[in-house]
Amino acid sequence: MRRVFSLANIKTMNFNWSNVQITAVILLAIALGIYWIISFRNARRNEINEPRRIFAEALPLLQDAQISTGEATGVYKLEGTYQGRFFQFKVIVDNLTARKLPSLWLMVTRPSPQPVPQMIDLMARHRGHTAFSNFDLLQHRL
Protein backbone atom coordinates (compact mmCIF):
# COMPACT_ATOMS: atom_id res chain seq x y z
CA MET A 1 0.00 0.00 0.00
CA ARG A 2 1.37 3.30 -1.04
CA ARG A 3 0.96 6.37 1.14
CA VAL A 4 0.38 9.70 -0.46
CA PHE A 5 1.65 12.69 1.48
CA SER A 6 -0.44 15.74 1.30
CA LEU A 7 -0.86 18.81 3.47
CA ALA A 8 -3.82 17.20 5.22
CA ASN A 9 -1.74 14.12 6.07
CA ILE A 10 1.13 16.21 7.46
CA LYS A 11 -1.19 18.08 9.84
CA THR A 12 -2.58 14.87 11.27
CA MET A 13 0.79 13.12 11.48
CA ASN A 14 2.15 12.64 15.00
CA PHE A 15 5.69 13.94 15.22
CA ASN A 16 7.83 13.51 18.34
CA TRP A 17 9.85 16.72 18.88
CA SER A 18 11.64 15.38 21.97
CA ASN A 19 13.74 13.03 19.80
CA VAL A 20 14.78 15.94 17.58
CA GLN A 21 15.69 18.06 20.61
CA ILE A 22 17.79 15.28 22.16
CA THR A 23 19.57 14.71 18.85
CA ALA A 24 20.23 18.45 18.46
CA VAL A 25 21.69 18.67 21.98
CA ILE A 26 23.94 15.66 21.34
CA LEU A 27 25.16 17.09 18.02
CA LEU A 28 25.78 20.47 19.63
CA ALA A 29 27.78 18.84 22.45
CA ILE A 30 29.87 16.88 19.93
CA ALA A 31 30.52 20.04 17.88
CA LEU A 32 31.56 21.99 20.98
CA GLY A 33 33.83 19.14 22.08
CA ILE A 34 35.56 19.04 18.70
CA TYR A 35 35.96 22.83 18.72
CA TRP A 36 37.44 22.70 22.24
CA ILE A 37 39.94 19.98 21.28
CA ILE A 38 41.05 21.84 18.14
CA SER A 39 41.46 25.16 19.97
CA PHE A 40 43.40 23.43 22.80
CA ARG A 41 45.78 21.84 20.27
CA ASN A 42 46.30 25.16 18.49
CA ALA A 43 46.99 26.96 21.78
CA ARG A 44 49.47 24.25 22.81
CA ARG A 45 51.23 24.44 19.42
CA ASN A 46 51.47 28.24 19.72
CA GLU A 47 52.82 27.93 23.26
CA ILE A 48 55.52 25.52 22.12
CA ASN A 49 56.55 27.78 19.19
CA GLU A 50 56.43 31.04 21.22
CA PRO A 51 60.12 31.12 22.32
CA ARG A 52 61.39 30.50 18.78
CA ARG A 53 59.08 33.23 17.46
CA ILE A 54 60.26 35.75 20.07
CA PHE A 55 63.98 35.07 19.49
CA ALA A 56 63.71 34.48 15.71
CA GLU A 57 65.99 37.38 14.77
CA ALA A 58 68.64 36.67 17.42
CA LEU A 59 68.90 32.89 16.95
CA PRO A 60 70.91 32.95 13.68
CA LEU A 61 73.45 35.35 15.22
CA LEU A 62 74.40 33.11 18.16
CA GLN A 63 76.59 30.03 18.17
CA ASP A 64 75.50 27.17 20.48
CA ALA A 65 72.12 28.86 21.01
CA GLN A 66 69.90 27.23 23.64
CA ILE A 67 66.33 28.25 24.45
CA SER A 68 64.86 27.37 27.83
CA THR A 69 61.74 28.30 29.75
CA GLY A 70 61.87 30.30 32.95
CA GLU A 71 60.21 29.68 36.27
CA ALA A 72 57.16 31.79 35.45
CA THR A 73 54.73 31.63 32.54
CA GLY A 74 55.86 33.62 29.53
CA VAL A 75 59.49 33.90 30.67
CA TYR A 76 61.98 32.50 28.16
CA LYS A 77 65.78 32.51 28.07
CA LEU A 78 68.11 32.39 25.10
CA GLU A 79 71.80 31.69 25.78
CA GLY A 80 74.65 31.52 23.33
CA THR A 81 77.93 33.02 22.21
CA TYR A 82 78.34 35.93 19.84
CA GLN A 83 81.83 36.70 18.51
CA GLY A 84 83.34 34.52 21.27
CA ARG A 85 81.45 36.21 24.13
CA PHE A 86 78.63 34.63 26.14
CA PHE A 87 75.25 36.40 26.13
CA GLN A 88 71.96 35.64 27.84
CA PHE A 89 68.64 37.10 26.67
CA LYS A 90 65.67 36.83 29.01
CA VAL A 91 62.11 37.93 28.23
CA ILE A 92 60.32 39.31 31.30
CA VAL A 93 56.61 40.10 31.54
CA ASP A 94 55.94 43.22 33.63
CA ASN A 95 52.32 43.51 34.70
CA LEU A 96 52.72 45.07 38.13
CA THR A 97 52.17 48.66 37.14
CA ALA A 98 48.61 49.88 37.52
CA ARG A 99 48.85 52.75 35.07
CA LYS A 100 49.53 50.78 31.89
CA LEU A 101 49.01 47.48 30.14
CA PRO A 102 51.44 44.58 30.66
CA SER A 103 54.83 45.16 29.09
CA LEU A 104 57.36 42.76 27.67
CA TRP A 105 60.96 43.51 28.67
CA LEU A 106 64.16 42.05 27.28
CA MET A 107 67.02 41.63 29.75
CA VAL A 108 70.39 41.13 28.07
CA THR A 109 73.16 39.77 30.29
CA ARG A 110 76.80 39.68 29.32
CA PRO A 111 78.76 38.24 32.24
CA SER A 112 82.35 39.38 32.51
CA PRO A 113 84.84 39.81 35.34
CA GLN A 114 84.33 43.00 37.35
CA PRO A 115 86.79 44.82 39.62
CA VAL A 116 84.33 44.36 42.52
CA PRO A 117 83.15 41.04 44.01
CA GLN A 118 79.43 41.97 43.87
CA MET A 119 77.12 41.77 40.88
CA ILE A 120 75.95 45.08 39.47
CA ASP A 121 72.62 45.09 37.67
CA LEU A 122 71.97 47.99 35.33
CA MET A 123 68.83 48.56 33.25
CA ALA A 124 69.21 50.72 30.16
CA ARG A 125 66.11 52.75 29.32
CA HIS A 126 65.55 55.38 26.70
CA ARG A 127 65.75 58.13 29.37
CA GLY A 128 68.83 56.82 31.17
CA HIS A 129 70.24 53.96 33.20
CA THR A 130 68.65 52.52 36.36
CA ALA A 131 70.17 50.15 38.88
CA PHE A 132 67.86 47.38 40.09
CA SER A 133 67.85 44.34 42.34
CA ASN A 134 68.07 40.96 40.68
CA PHE A 135 66.12 39.26 43.49
CA ASP A 136 64.59 36.55 41.31
CA LEU A 137 67.98 34.81 41.07
CA LEU A 138 68.49 34.52 44.85
CA GLN A 139 68.67 31.00 46.31
CA HIS A 140 66.00 31.54 49.00
CA ARG A 141 62.63 33.19 48.50
CA LEU A 142 60.08 34.38 51.03
Image (cartoon, rainbow, N blue to C red):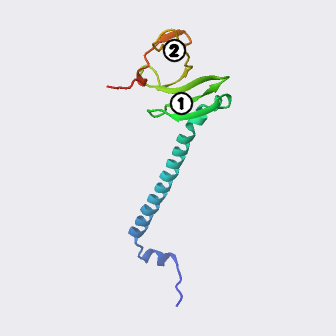
Outermost residue, left side: 142
Q: Give how far across and how far down residue 19 sits, in percent.
A: 41, 70
Residue found at the far bottom of this picture? 1
- The amino acid at mark 2 is Met
What residue sits 46% from the left and 59% below the top?
Answer: 28
Q: Residue at x 48, y 15 (%)?
A: 121
Q: Is residue 51 above or below residue 112?
A: below
Q: Against 128, is 134 above or below?
A: below
* Mark 2 burial class by Cα count in 10 Å: few <14, some 14-19, many 20+: few
Residue beneath the point at 45% across and 34% down? 73
Give me the residue at 52% from left, 27% from top: 91
Q: Which residue is mark 1?
A: 77
Left or right position of 121 against 82: left
Q: Position of residue 123 (x, y in %)?
A: 51, 14
Q: Quadrant of residue 124?
A: top right
Q: Could you tell whether 96 is left or right of 88 in the image? A: left
Q: Where does the image place residue 47, in percent across and percent down from the top left? A: 53, 40
Residue 61, located in which quarter of the rendered image? top right
The image quadrant of residue 18 is bottom left
The tag earlier along the polypeptide, 1 or 2, is 1
Residue 95: x %, y % from top left: 44, 25
Within-10-Å neighbours for mark 1: few <14, some 14–19, many 20+: some
Labelled disc at residue 63: none
The residue to which callout 2 is attached is 123
* Residue nearest the observer in this picture, 22 or 58: 58
User: Which of the two discs, 1 and 2, sits closer to the camera?
Assistant: 1
Residue 120 drawn above or below residue 46: above
Circle 1: element type: strand
- 71 or 138: nearer the viewer: 138
Element carrying mark 2 = strand
